[in-house]
Image (cartoon, rainbow, N blue to C red):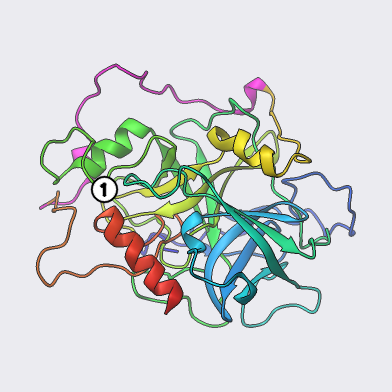
Amino acid sequence: MSGCPSCPARSPRGHGGVAAEDDTVPCGTPVHRRVVGGSGAQEGQWPWTVSVAFRGRHVCGGALIAPAWVLTAAHCFPPENPLPEYRVTLGVLQLLSPPPDAQVRGVASVARHPAYGGDDIAGDLALARLDPPASPSRLVRPVCVPAAGVTFDPGMNCTVTGWGHVRTAVPLPPPKALQQLEVPLLSRRHCRCLYALGTGTGTGTELGTPAGDTLCAGLPRGQRDACQGDSGGPLTCRLAGTWHLAGVVSWGDACGLPGRPGVYTAVSPHLPWILSLVPELAPRRPPPDAVPGVPNVPEGVPEGPCEWRELPPGWPRPLSPGPGGDTDTDTGVAPGGARALRLAALAAALLWVLG
């Protein structure tokens, strides 16, 4: 996860005390209160964040939404990868030093969203069924899934969590502690505008622009972002004191580049598909005044130019790398991971998972 190199991590705001294990604890309720700004998390802070490993190697994150179900990214499960070689670890803070009560589960089945696989990388979601189901505890709790129609407005600060790289091609050092990063949401129009810079027409229709079922988060000037290994991880927003799953890390252009915010698959638009597989799920609808809304640009209304003042001199650069240019090899947390062009990035991500 890529944070602001010049911004000091903020101190914890206090603990709520360690709760006793209780299967009736509502969704979206952590043991500890959060700490913001790219920093290491505390035990029990994000009890729904899971590690997805293939052949013993962490490849993606995920979010526990029900005892038997993890929501993650579709590209984390290429069809050619044998499911018996996947493992999901829950209730862990440091991947290299799991606690005695960490839970490791197999993957019984995976359902990829039916829209996944097109040129625009829409529907980058997968539901992994755990075998056996997770046991709720103070370190393992589901996140709340927002009800249909719940929106997360531009300007709202949300948090992305994962064990991905700290910068492009720089792995998270031992003991590989879970990282957290607070990022502001951007409007879809602003995000598409930024991704269109340097691609020719600025219409937002070229390869490399976010699909209609996505959320974007980060700063136009870059720095605060997800990175390789964060794919599938949760982007959660706090509404009325409860954490809701707003999006799943999907993709990005490297890590923390200016003008290339992180792209997440939004959860709420895909609720019918999720409920068709997890009918026991009870989506949450926060009170109407729980979201400190920032007015969005209505669809169909032309918007002004991108926020050029926040971009560094010499920007924009071309979206796709020139001869000999570097490309990432995986999808990351806030911006998902690698992709100069979407399809090229997907291919790289699959090779990274298989490698």
Residue 164 can be seen, yes or no: yes
Where residue 66 appears, x then y in whole percent? 75, 50
The residue segment tinted magenta is: 288-314
- Quarter location, residue 20: bottom right
Q: Residue at x 65, y 21 (%)?
A: 288
Answer few, some or many: residues within 10 Å of disc 1's Cα (few below 14, many 20 plus, some between 14 and 19): many
Tell me if 282 is positioned left or right of 232 in this view. right
Query: As rendered, which of 34 and 349 lies closer to the eye?
Result: 349
- Up-down relation of residue 252 to residue 309 (above or below): below
Instruction: Name the main secondary structure of what is drawn in magenta.
Output: loop
Q: Is 302 covered by the magenta stretch?
A: yes
Tell me if 202 is positioned left or right of 111 in this view. left
Q: Residue at x 31, y 61 (%)?
A: 345
- Up-down relation of residue 167 to residue 209 (above or below): below
Q: Which residue is mark 1?
A: 208
Tell me if 58 is positioned left or right of 221 in this view. right
Where residue 111 appears, x then y in whole percent? 59, 52
Residue 254 can be seen, yes or no: no
Q: Is 276 covered by the magenta stretch?
A: no
